Structures are given as structure tokens and as C-alpha cells.
Amino acid sequence: MKKTVARKLVSLLLMFVGLQYAAAQQLNVKGTVTDPSGEPVIGASVMVEGTKTGTSTDIDGVFTVTADAKGKLRISYIGYEPQEVAINGRKEINIIMKENSAVLDEVVVIGYGTMDKKELT
């Protein structure tokens, strides 16, 4: 009698541990962020939705981030519409950004003034 109760308890414990592991499975997600013409987007922000985990793309538009298999990635860059992509257990995700021309109209650079040579160091 004691052996069967112990076996049932161990089986239940293993089942709960297995369910917890499956629910919180972490993946290394790798991908590329490109613009509509296929050029890499350098320095795009790639954040894991609902966490403080994130990274930015390198010179080739490539990123690598650790995320929950059932989570979402949020990709953003100035001049492009932010995108949310579901991971769905994928280890590789390639994103093509969509241009947002309205944002480009908001960027203004102003420079004026004079400075003596002695003020520069």
C-alpha cells in the first residue's frame, strides 16, 4: 500500500515539474531585420514583450535574444512602423520593416551659433 502511494506522489510531482518546464521554455531566437528593399536595418530595437530583455541589430541587421517560446518580439526603428511578432516556438524569425513616412516629417535638426577657437578643446 505504501509503495503505490509513494509511486503516485512521485508521478504527480514529475508531471507538475514537466508542465512547469514546458510552460516556461526559453529559446535563443535569431533573426534579421531588413527594410522593404532588402537592406539590413542597423541598430533596430528588438525587445521581448512584457520583459526588460532586449537587444539591437548589428551591421548586418542580425539579432539574437533569449525569449519565452510562446512570447512576442517588438521591433522598432525610427522611420519604420513598430512591429510585434509572435515567436510560436520558432528559433529563427526574419522581419521586413514597413516605412512610416509620417515619422520622418517630425525629425528636425537645427544648428547655429559661433565659437572662438580658444573655446574648443
Image: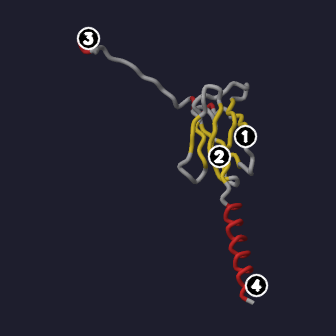
> Does residue 119 sit above or below 89 in this rendering?
above
SS at mark 2?
A: strand
SS at mark 3?
A: loop
SS at mark 4?
A: helix
Q: Gap in Å between the C-alphas at discs 2 and 1?
A: 10 Å
**Quadrant in which the N terminus appears:** bottom right
Q: Gap in Å between the C-alphas at discs 2 and 3?
A: 49 Å
Where residue 89 sits in the image (x, y, percent)?
74, 50
C-beta proximity under 8 Å, tags 2 and 1: yes
Mark 4 vs 2, N-terminal side: 4
Q: Name the residue under label 3.
A: 116
Asked if residue 16 lies left or right of residue 44, the reply is right
User: Could you tell me if residue 90 is visible in this image?
Assistant: yes
Q: Mark 2 points at which residue?
A: 73
At 56% from the left and 29% from the top, the residue drawn is 105
> Does residue 106 sit above or below 48 in this rendering?
above
Mark 2 vs 1, N-terminal side: 2
Place residue 34 in its image quadrant.
Answer: top right
C-beta proximity under 8 Å, tags 1 and 4: no
Q: Which of 18 and 41 is in front in this view?
A: 18
Q: Which of 59 and 120 is in front in this view?
A: 59
At 71% from the left and 37% from the top, the residue drawn is 95
Q: Gap in Å between the C-alphas at discs 3 and 1?
A: 52 Å
Mark 2 vs mark 3, foreground winner is: 2
Q: Gap in Å between the C-alphas at discs 4 and 2?
A: 46 Å
Q: Gap in Å between the C-alphas at discs 1 and 4?
A: 47 Å
User: Could you tell me if residue 98 is visible in this image?
Assistant: no
Task: Answer few, some or many: residues within 10 Å of disc 1's Cα (few below 14, many 20 plus, some between 14 and 19).
Answer: some
Q: Which residue lies furthest to the left in this view?
A: 118
C-beta proximity under 8 Å, tags 3 and 1: no
Q: Name the residue under label 1.
A: 93
